[in-house]
Image: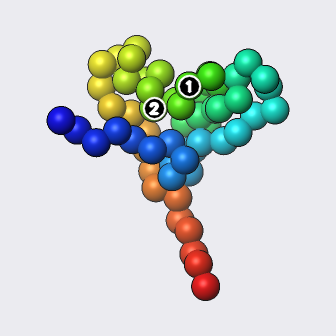
Amino acid sequence: MEKPINCLQCQYFYVTWEQHHPRGCKAHGFKSKQLPSLVVKKASGQACHAFTKKNTVRS
C-alpha cells in the first residue's frame, strides 16, 4: 500500500478564499474542496506525479 501524498508539503498547493473550493493546485490548475492529491487519485487512479516537496528553511 502506497503512502498518500500530503499536498500541504507540495510547492504547488495553495489555499484560496473561495468557500466552496478552498484548496488549489498550481501544477494541475484546479481548485477543490478536497486535497488536490485525492482528486487526482480518484480521477486517474494514480498518485499525483506533480508533487514537489517545498523548500523549507528553518533557523
Residue extending farthest to the top is 43
Q: Residue at x 23, y 38 (%)?
A: 2
Give the structural element (helix, strand or loop) at label 1: loop
Give the structural element (helix, strand or loop) at label 2: helix
Q: In the displayed structure, would residue 11 be above or below residue 3?
A: below
Which residue, given by chain and number where applicable, does mark 2 sit on?
37
Q: Is residue 45 left or right of residue 40?
A: left
Disc nearest the viewer among 1 and 2: 1
Residue type beneath disc 1: Gln
Disc tally is 2
Residue 49 in view (yes/no): no
Q: Is residue 46 left or right of residue 37?
A: left
Q: In the displayed structure, would residue 50 be above or below residue 35?
A: below
Q: Is residue 28 left or right of residue 31?
A: left
Residue 7 in view (yes/no): yes
Residue type beneath disc 2: Ser
Where is residue 58 shown, x and y percent of the image? Answer: 59, 78
Front one among 4 and 47: 4
Disc 1 packing (10 Å; few <14; some 14–19; many ≥20):
few
Q: Which mark is residue 34?
A: 1
Q: Is residue 7 left or right of residue 14?
A: left
Front one among 55 and 18: 18
Q: In the displayed structure, would residue 4 be above or below residue 36?
A: below
Disc 2 packing (10 Å; few <14; some 14–19; many ≥20):
many
Where is residue 45 shown, x and y percent of the image? Answer: 30, 19
Task: Give the quarter of the figure containing the C terminus.
Answer: bottom right
Cα–Cα span, label 1 and label 2: 8 Å
Where is residue 7 shown, x and y percent of the image? Answer: 50, 42
